[in-house]
Image (spheres, helix red, strand yellow):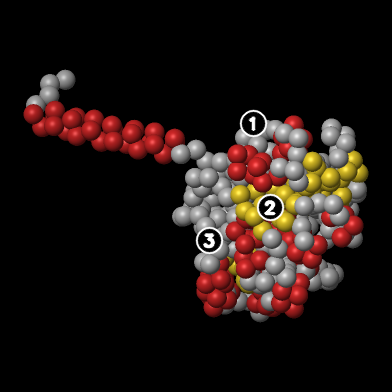
């Protein structure tokens, strides 16, 4: 190839640009991202000569896949008890399944369930503890119950003079807020606070908000220590080292979860008992929809909803773009295609209202409101929450 002056100038400019880019890229990579758990140089000195408890599950891993409990034992930290959230310490219990007390076979440390009848640590369970660590990978969605477990833990800590330390982890739905804001009347374990479905805070930031807004019972405030993420940016997406629960097996399911979980309050399956939980939806009564599947018992779904029945719906496992908003199109489509004179689309226990945070969304769907009208109705509440949220954001976009 023959180069003239213009060619050489162009090549020179490209080389200079490439050099600048490589230098910037190297500097960016040098700023290594770290979870709270991967910064023991910060939290180990704070645990010295203290007796602790720890709320964690299968996601409480360091970068090298060592479990935090094993790491703390190796570093001679005195752990009196492990507290297990929904799905258990090993993360293999079904959604809603009772989690039993027990003993960790590897370390001999007692395991106390915080799911079922005992969602809040009792005074006798905290007796002798100076501090409780909370280290769980959350998914940043209001009805995912780990933030409720954190709330009860903070409340118990405040009432019993026990410090709470949160080792922060990324939020796979960080950097935006969306969905209806919960109304106080509909508070439950799948929604304890007046926040939208997607609230755009890490679990560490969320704990700060609960404490700062005095949302704990009787306005008590916990002694709250946050070990923040290092080199974390809210609009960037970070890989999750271990699935947070049996039916969120991959990034696609996690991304679709806030939009599809509303189906849990309806006669429509979200794929529990298949290879694509929270990546498909369907029912025997939506026969106009193209995809077919039959839920069957499997790991994480011992008796799945609509077990053994042919369901018709949609397969979203290849949905092209990661969502950064709630998509209600699938919910509205399923409602319009639902044809069963024997059963209403919504479950009789109105669990749908608990998930939505009030009865407004259900009534809007029944009234035939458009997607645009429904989303417009959230605007005022989202603006109010945004002002509260802004006080507790500690990471840059």
Mark 3 — residue?
393
Mark 1 — residue?
64
Q: Nearer the viewer, mark 3 or mark 2?
A: 2
Characterize the local packing of mark 1: few (<14), some (14-19) or many (20 or more) Cα atoms within 10 angstroms: few
In this view of the protein, which residue sits in the foreground, 361 or 239?
Answer: 239
Estimate the x, y position of residue 124 in percent, counting from the top left. 90, 57
Q: Nearer the viewer, mark 2 or mark 1?
A: 2
Estimate the x, y position of residue 281 in percent, counting from the top left. 70, 54
Residue 183 sits in quarter? bottom right
In this view of the protein, which residue sits in the foreground, 291 or 181?
Answer: 181
Residue 154 sits in quarter? bottom right
**Res 135 label:** none
Whole-angstrom CA distance, mark 3 to mark 1, is 28 Å
Whole-angstrom CA distance, mark 3 to mark 2, is 18 Å
Lower sequence index among marks 3 and 1 = 1
Where disc 2 sits, the SS reads: strand
Where disc 3 sits, the SS reads: loop
Characterize the local packing of mark 3: few (<14), some (14-19) or many (20 or more) Cα atoms within 10 angstroms: some
Residue displayed at 59% across by 52% down: 171
Q: How many marks?
A: 3
Estimate the x, y position of residue 336 in percent, counting from the top left. 67, 68
Residue 59 sits in quarter? top right
Lower sequence index among marks 3 and 2 = 2
Residue displayed at 52% across by 41% down: 33
In this view of the protein, which residue sits in the foreground, 63 or 318?
Answer: 63
Estimate the x, y position of residue 353 in percent, counting from the top left. 74, 72
Where disc 1 sits, the SS reads: loop
In this view of the protein, which residue sits in the foreground, 393 or 360?
Answer: 393
Mark 2 — residue?
165
Whole-angstrom CA distance, mark 2 to mark 1, is 22 Å
């Amino acid at each position: 190839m023959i180069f003239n002056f213009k060619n050489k100038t162009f090549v020179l400019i490209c080389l200079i640009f490439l050099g600048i880019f490589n230098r910037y890229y190297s500097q960016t990579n040098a700023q290594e991202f770290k979870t709270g758990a991967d910064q023991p140089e910060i939290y180990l000195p704070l645990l010295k000569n203290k007796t602790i408890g720890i709320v964690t599950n299968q996601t409480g891993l360091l970068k090298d896949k060592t479990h935090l409990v094993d790491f703390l034992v190796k570093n001679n930290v005195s752990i009196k008890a492990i507290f297990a959230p929904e799905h258990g310490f090993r993360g293999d219990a079904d959604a809603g399944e009772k989690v039993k007390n027990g003993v960790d076979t590897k370390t001999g440390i007692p395991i106390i369930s915080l799911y079922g009848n005992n969602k809040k640590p009792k005074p006798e369970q905290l007796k002798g503890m100076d501090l409780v660590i909370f280290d769980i990978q959350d998914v940043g969605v209001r009805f995912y119950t780990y933030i409720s477990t954190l709330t009860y833990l903070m409340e118990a800590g405040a009432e019993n003079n026990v410090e709470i330390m949160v080792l922060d982890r990324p939020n796979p739905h960080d950097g935006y807020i969306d969905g209806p804001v919960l109304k106080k009347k509909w508070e439950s374990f799948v929604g304890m606070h007046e926040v939208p479905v997607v609230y755009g805070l890490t679990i560490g930031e969320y704990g700060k908000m609960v404490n700062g807004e005095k949302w704990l019972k009787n306005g008590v405030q916990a002694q709250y220590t946050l070990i923040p993420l290092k080199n974390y940016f809210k609009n960037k997406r970070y890989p999750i080292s271990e699935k947070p629960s049996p039916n969120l097996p991959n990034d696609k399911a996690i991304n679709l979860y806030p939009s599809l979980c509303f189906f849990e309050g309806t006669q429509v399956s979200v794929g529990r008992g298949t290879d694509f939980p929270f990546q498909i939806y369907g029912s025997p009564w939506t026969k106009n929809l193209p995809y077919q599947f039959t839920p069957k018992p499997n790991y994480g779904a011992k008796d799945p909803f609509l077990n053994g029945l042919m369901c018709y719906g949609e397969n979203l496992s290849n949905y092209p773009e990661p969502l950064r908003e709630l998509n209600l199109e699938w919910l509205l489509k399923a409602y319009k295609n639902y044809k069963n004179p024997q059963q209403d689309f919504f479950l009789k226990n109105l669990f749908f209202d608990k998930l939505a945070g009030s009865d407004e969304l259900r009534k809007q769907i029944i009234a035939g409101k458009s997607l645009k009208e429904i989303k417009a109705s959230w605007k005022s509440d989202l603006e109010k929450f945004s002002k509260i949220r802004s006080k507790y954001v500690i990471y840059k976009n």
